[in-house]
Amino acid sequence: MEAVALHDFHATAEDELSFKKGSVLKVLNTEEDKHWYKAEQDGKDGLIPKNYIQMKPHEWYRGRITRAKAEEILSQQPHDGAFLIRESESTPGDFSLSVKFGWGVQHFKVLRDGAGKYFLWVVKFNSLNQLVEYHRTSSVSRTQTIYLRDMVKEVS
């Protein structure tokens, strides 16, 4: 998830992350503390006060849900490419991309390089948002053609 800084923040402890008003931060974890989020900017990570930022919400981000719950949600979707991003169960702090295809759901581990860039295969991105936008027109799979599409809100 991404957030925009509403105010300057100057870290006062080693585990905090300083930032300027207007900065875009990658929020890595929102579940551990109700007042602080773990975030990253320019390859550095640390805690930030949640009341200093505004989240840029996305319907596709589901946070800490299980792989089974992702499959349940996506199996009700009418079209291939319906997707969501969730926190990884096997690697806390990382993300997984779950995508409906055919009669099932495929899961992709969202990888990160040493500079903090996100990727599935070769092309790297500064944010999950950019990764999602790219894969709306470029397949997420190497063996099938699967483009990301927003989920249908109400499925009858």
Image: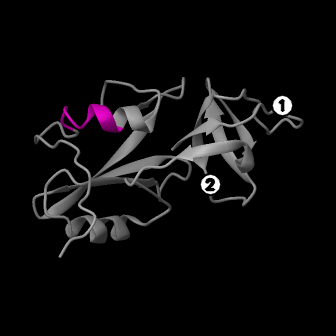
Hey, which residue is sitting farthest bottom in the picture?
A: 156
Residue that label 1 marks: 10
Q: Is residue 40 left or right of residue 67?
A: right
Q: Main secondary structure of the magenta part?
A: loop
Q: Amino acid at mark 2?
A: Thr
Which residues fall within the magenta stretch? Answer: 132-139
Marks 1 and 2: which is nearer the front?
A: 1
* Count of numbered tags: 2
Residue displayed at 55% across by 53% down: 92
Percent x, y of residue 77: 19, 65
Image quadrant holding the C terminus, namely: bottom left
Q: Is residue 137 magenta?
A: yes
Name the foreground residue: 129 vs 144. 129
Residue displayed at 38% across by 32% down: 130
Residue 16 falls in image quadrant:
top right
Q: Is residue 43 left or right of residue 135?
A: right
Q: Amino acid at mark 1?
A: His
Residue that label 2 marks: 30
Q: Is residue 131 left or right of residue 47?
A: left
Percent x, y of residue 97: 34, 49
Percent x, y of residue 127: 46, 33
